[in-house]
Amino acid sequence: MQRNVLYLIILALGIVAAVSCEHEITFDYPTAETKVVFDGQISNESTFVRISHTRPVADSTKNHFISDAQVWVASDDGTEEQLYYDEEQQCYLSSTGLVGSTGHTYQMRAIVEGRNYEATATMPPPAPVDTIYFRWIDVLHQVKLFFVCVKGQDPLPGKRNYYLIRLLRGEELFRWNPRSGRSNTDGKFEYDIICSSDSETSSGLSDDGKPPLMDGDTLRMELMTIDRQCWYYFQSMAVSDRTTTNPLTNIRGGGLGVFMATNITRPDTIVFDKETLLSKESISSHDS
Amino acid sequence: MCRFLKKMTLRHSILLFLFFVLGIIPVNAQVEGVQLQDTLKEVLVKSQAATRRLNDVQIGAEKIDVETMSQLPAMFGERDIVKSIQLLPGVKGEGDGLGGYQVRGGTSAQNHILLDGASVYNVGHLMGLFSAFNDDAIGSVELFKGLMAARYGGGSSSVLTMSTRGGDPERHHLSTTVGLLSAKIEADGPMGDNGSYLVAGRTSYLDLFIKASGKYSNNALNFYDVNTRLNYKLSPSDQLYLSLFRGHDGMKVEELVNMTWSNTTGSLGWIHTLSPRSYTHTQLVASNYATDQGMDVYSFNLNMKGFNRQLTLRHQQTWTPNQVYTFNVGGESTLLGVKSASWRIVANNECEKREGWFASLWASDDVSLFNNRLLVSAGLRCEWFSALGGKPYYTFNEEGDIQDTLHFKKGTIVKTYTSLQPRLSLTWKIGSQVAFKAGYSRLAQMVQPIRNSTMTLPIDRLAMTSNYVKPLIADQVAAGISVMANDGSWDFSADGYWKKLKNVYDFREGKSFNSEIELERLIIGGRGRAYGMELAAHKNTGRTTGWVAYTLSWVQNRIDGIMGGEWYTAPNDRRHDFVVVLMSQLSPSWTFSSTWRYTTGQAMTVPSGKYEINGETRYYFGDRNQNRAPDYHRLDLSVAHSTTKGKATRTWTFGLFNAYCRYNPFLVTFKEDDTKPSGTKAVVTSIFGIVPTVSFTYKY
């Protein structure tokens, strides 16, 4: 929200002066000690842990994976399994098809280059989805913004629920957004994920480096319920570029990243068709 | 000397006893030849400014010459008090177009601004493009950069006092100014035989352009402010005044965003002259700073409000028994109500609102010894702050989670803090051209605005001292020398300062202003320190006047959990700051002025590594604020032409803001770009290029 406010402030200042501009500068980026990064989850579908190194800013080679770590996942029911490294998927997987169960707490332990790391996460119940669709809004008669809207039911009505919403285009992550259900007093939620603007889809260029939403693009949503600590991780990640701080990890031992226990709900896929969408009236916020 | 001090102490003791215990004000002191300070009197000190810099006992006190300020280049044709303050040594702006200022390593949140004794917050219109103060209505402005007399308090970094100008008791005046984006009007004059009035108003008319645009007519960007001052002489020894101020800002983007923020203050004052050497000043002051931010985008519906309301009764007495001493004693009592936030997110309402009671007593003495060669200002201020019950208070664990909720009856004291604040300033003059100065002061701040950025924004949340939040305490020592040329045409000054702060609060890592309604869960306290040196040279006479100022400074913070608890460079650290101000009377009708500023780039944290997670490349941030944004420099020019016919004066003012179109950094962001060899690029966003301005002023 604050990021949006900041943009609006900049917009307001821009209206006044109409002379703002952007230009690129060079930096001598500092070099920090290499850190171990965890990207792991146990869900109702699967278990994986991906481990990599940080790299210098000037290094454009992505994904410095670590393949010689030892990784275990244990449940509060007393079971524990060591994961194996899968060369093809470049991550550590369960050989028994381990999946998580609602309400259980899981612990990940890892030994990476002689150092111990661990994290715990609790798996909330799944969130049923009622509907998912595109909608759009006209801002200042200049920008048409396209959203994906998802409506559903909080798994724990009356309590604060935590979500990570991921939109995938094909196999690639297109958009993600952490949400908190503290405002859903009636036990139902409704969330919008901003996807693209009209100008981006027309020009084929977007500000974040990812190709904008184009006609025929198919989007799949992963609606993930997560615990509060994981939500803090993604919420702080969402603002980390602005606050220039690292996300609040749940990894102990000096690592970066997150290990989450999540229930994933997958609503129907939706296909983007700009003309059809724009033929519908722009819905004002009060109509939602 | 000792005997002398004993006498002084006895007099002080008697005074304090009478004032504090019996509530009786001594009225029988009689010494001739002493001129009283009259706070109602308009203070324009152009000719005295240089002498004052030399003779003022307070090191780091800056009297702003309102007349000089009117000659400085004006942005959008609008003269600006706060932007003029930013040109003083040791004072910096927050950035292009932003109205806050930072003093001696402090943040703008650590300044206390008083208008006729009433607290004013967020002193910028349109996010700081304009100052909240109409210069036509302001009579005197004084900035204390951390060292000040015991009667001042409330800010841990600086105190800025302003008083509304009194109307002319002899004849009526009318003036109006039309600028590019705003217009203002001011009228003042006599009110009966014993009174005077002043009314000044200012409004933007950006909305007119927006409404006229047709398709943007559902948007708004506006501000207004109104100053009123009424003076009335009840008797030769009694004067009453009433000062009212209202400043309001609004921004609306269709049905999506609607933000307003405002300051409303009222001061009712009574100045009673007890004798030619003694007077009392009693004030009843009310102020209300309120914010209201609404955002309504599809399913995201947020309305967030906050306020800081104060009601103050203040009384002080100044007594100058002879040419050696000037005593000032006083006290004040303030009831505070602070709403750090209330918000409605979709259908859920949450609110955090608390009340507090603040009181202070002070006593000070300005002493002039050894034939005016040694000036001493010594004082003691004692402040009490009590957090009051009625709303929940909490205890927290190290992660900021609530451990226990505490309930107290409304009005009962939850916790009281006491702060003893010694104030001492010394000036030793050698002849009439050289003065050595030194001083020490302790200041406390009971309400701290907490912000995610280094900018003053209406989304700041206000942290009031509580069982968890402690008062921000600042200790400062400073020393310097002032030298004036024989004819007063030039003067030079060099000041050094060292300041330490404790209980400086900031957001915990990864937390933002709306992460939780309980503000204390989001913040963590630490320490700060700042030190530096200020050099200034003023040219005071001739057709061309002005000054050159250079500040060398360091600012560091130390907060548990950040950088392993080690000292790190604060985001408001700017190593070098250089200002040149020139004002020239080209002819009887033409004046020219210019300002140029160079400042080292803002300290910032840049990525020191990157990695992939969640399907994206993310940056790893190492040590805080070890890099710098690009340096800031800007030239502003202004030329004014005035013609006078009869009692009317017309002035056209033309200006160039950022004359050589330097795109100074407002924001630096990092983005992934596969076309770059490193895959990463840094992008600077600038707010202003060159901005031409014009305004027309008519005065009668």
Image: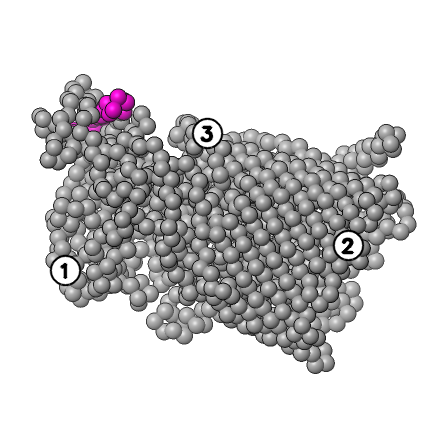
How dense is the environment of label 2, judged by Cα within 10 Å: few (below 14), some, or many (20 and up)?
few
- The residue to which callout 2 is attached is B485
Is residue A187 in the magenta section? no
Q: Secondary structure at mark 1?
A: loop
The image position of residue B407, as x and y in percent, is 47, 31
Question: Residue visible at 44% across and 49% down?
Answer: B629
Give the side of residue B172 with respect to residue B118, left or right: right
As rendered, which of B605 and B154 lies closer to the eye? B605
Q: Which residues are magenta?
A: A98-117
Protein chain holding label 1 = A
Q: Amino acid at mark 1?
A: Asp
Disc ID at residue B565? 3
Protein chain holding label 2 = B
Total numbered labels: 3
Is residue A99 in the magenta section? yes
Of tags 2 and 3, which is closer to the observer?
A: 2
Q: Can you say which quadrant of the picture contains the N terminus of chain B?
A: top right
Q: Is residue B259 above or below residue B544?
A: above
